[in-house]
Amino acid sequence: MKIKHLHSIPKQALSSIAFFAGFLLFTGCVFDGLETPNGEGTASGQTIQVTIDMPDSTPQTRISFEEKGESVVLEWQEDDSIDLLVVTEKGTQIQQTVIVSPDPKNPKKATFELKLPHESEGEVFDLYGVYGGNGFVFLDNECFASLPSLSQSSGSLLGIQNRKSIVLTFACEKIPRDNPSISVKFKHLGSLFKISLKNKSHDVWDVLVDFTYVALYSREHKINIFAHQQDGVENMLYNVRTGGIKNSTFNPVLPFNIGDDFKESKINPDEDLDLWAWYIPGSEDSHLWPGLSLELEFQKKGIRQNIFKPKREKPTDPGKVFYFRAIFDVGKPEIVWEI
């Protein structure tokens, strides 16, 4: 993927009015236990039912997205699927894709069917799960989840939902095959980032016609923004067992995709253009984000904001929603702040 820099860009009326973090409310998807239907034993090759349960104090867990205030609630939907990897004591890797069935009487609970490994594979097994992305890829006897590309993981919130571009993972190891009992939680691999650009002009914006490029950028272009981005043409890969990421790089620019999600989208005066993206923040202590600002191309004219958000004092966390709010009036040359 090419990273675009806009050099020598004139200052326009693009002003930042807010930056804050909300939470992705997916905090308690718990596998409360593996139970065999009708109390039967776990014979060789038998399918058992996994119950996904949540405490009463946590949000619902269907994987549909609903923005509520400063948070985005994730909830299970009918026919949602999860990719599973079972690793046996002998090292055999077994891939399964299972359909989740939400409990119609209790939206905090869902179930799916898991096929147990054969008893000849050993007494214990490990179970890894991934929601979202592009399925599993096996390289050098390692299992990777293929992560969404920028065109999949950026656009409108509904588009990101429909493309399953938020990736959640869980791991549970050393499960006794003859008495499987599991309690695990999904974990967020990345965070959502939202740019809200208010139209303060007198004209209606035709999004796909007027905007060709929108990005967050580092105050100093030599300093990277520590969010994993695709390095080259191959999708990023997440190692299901180790948590490592392949085919990724860091760049000083964090682009937001303007594509088919905004087909025929019009933004009237005083309305907001909302651009969303899902990125995986760097996890090292040294991965401190630099000061950020906005740049864009509007009607083929490059515009850069010269008001910067300060650098972060600690690494950016996964599982949150980060908001960047700005106003834009192409007819005024000065920065205008809106409280």
Image (cartoon, rainbow, N blue to C red):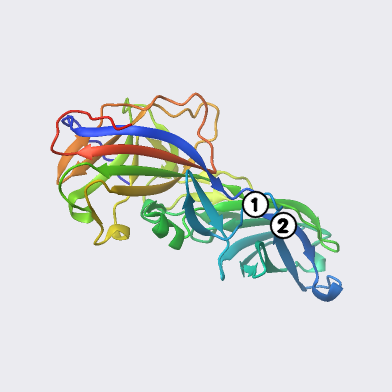
Q: Residue at x 47, y 46 (%)?
A: 69
At label 2, counting other C-alpha atoms closer than 10 Å, the crowd grade (few under 14, some 14-19, many 20 or more) is many
| Three-letter code, disc 1 | Phe
Q: Is residue 298 above or below residue 159?
A: above
Element type at mark 2? strand
* Residue 59 sits above or below residue 39 on the image: above
Which of 28 and 226 lies nearest the eye of the viewer?
28
* Residue 144 image position (x, y, % from top left): 56, 54
Q: Residue 229's image quarter?
A: top left
Image label count? 2
Residue 214: x %, y % from top left: 28, 43
Name the spot of residue 156 as percent of width and height, x first.
37, 54
Q: Amino acid at mark 2?
A: Phe
Task: List the residue tagged with mark 1.
Answer: 170
Question: Where residue 42 appears, x then y in whole percent?
Answer: 83, 70
Residue in the foreground of this view, choosing between 244 and 155: 155
Q: Quadrant of residue 86?
A: bottom right
Residue carrying label 2:
31
Q: Are marks 1 and 2 in contact (CB under 8 Å)?
A: yes
Q: Is residue 152 above or below residue 229?
A: below
